[in-house]
């Protein structure tokens, strides 16, 4: 359903006819938000996440997007490492935004500043 939203698009990583990773994004004016980002755990540390993120950044810049946001559970250490390695910085936090086995987990709000306007 996310791809039916106005301004939404995504990229997938397919190997041997199997989806190994995906990223879904939604544009709103000169900002974009990553709605979903996932890589098969058996394929972690193979660069798939970084390449999907790079594809999104190129697409965002071609659409004159200046800021790319996402939210991630503070206990999702592998994802946070990918985000930091691709230029994201924490800019906020949402208390008890997620739940894991009934336990509240904070969401980190992260931002990546992209290039200047092209127009």
Image (spheres, rainbow, N blue to C red):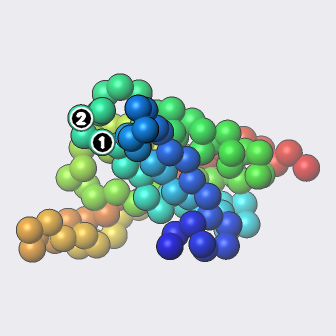
Q: Secondary structure at mark 2?
A: helix
* 35 relative to 56, above or below: below
Using residue 113 as the reference point, say whether residue 75 is left or right of it: left
* 48 relative to 12, above or below: above
In the image, residue 109 lies at what x, y percent?
41, 59
How far apart are the alpha carbons under marks 2 and 1?
A: 5 Å
Using residue 71 as the reference point, say whether residue 75 is left or right of it: left
Q: Secondary structure at mark 1?
A: loop
Using residue 95 as the reference point, say whether residue 114 is left or right of it: right
In the image, residue 30 lies at what x, y percent?
72, 60
- Mark 2 neighbour class, 10 Å CA radius: few under 14, some 14 to 19, many 20 or more: few
The residue lying at 9 percent from left, 74 percent from top is 102
The residue lying at 67 percent from left, 39 percent from top is 58
Q: Which residue is mark 1?
A: 40
* 24 relative to 16, above or below: below
The residue lying at 60 percent from left, 45 percent from top is 56
The residue lying at 77 percent from left, 45 percent from top is 62
* 12 relative to 91, above or below: above
The quadrant in which residue 80 appears is top left
Q: Is residue 52 visible?
A: yes
Front-lying residue, 87 or 4: 4
Q: Are marks 2 and 1 in contact (CB under 8 Å)?
A: yes
Q: Residue furthest front?
A: 17
Q: Which residue is mark 2?
A: 42
In the image, residue 104 lies at what x, y percent?
16, 71
Q: Is residue 90 visible?
A: no
Using residue 18 as the reference point, say whether residue 102 is left or right of it: left
- Mark 1 neighbour class, 10 Å CA radius: few under 14, some 14 to 19, many 20 or more: few
In the image, residue 29 lies at what x, y percent?
73, 66
Q: Residue furthest right?
A: 119
Circle count: 2
Q: Residue furthest top?
A: 46
């Amino acid at each position: 359903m996310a791809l039916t939203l106005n301004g939404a698009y995504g990229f997938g990583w397919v190997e041997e006819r199997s989806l190994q990773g995906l990223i879904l994004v939604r544009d709103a004016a000169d900002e974009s938000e990553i709605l979903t980002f996932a890589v098969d755990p058996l394929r972690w540390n193979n660069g798939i996440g970084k390449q999907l993120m790079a594809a999104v950044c190129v697409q965002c810049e071609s659409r004159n997007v200046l800021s790319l946001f996402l939210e991630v559970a503070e206990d999702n250490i592998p994802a946070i490492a990918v985000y930091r390695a691709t230029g994201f910085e924490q800019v906020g936090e949402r208390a008890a935004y997620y739940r894991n086995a009934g336990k509240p987990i904070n969401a980190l709000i992260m931002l990546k500043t992209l290039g200047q306007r092209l127009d």
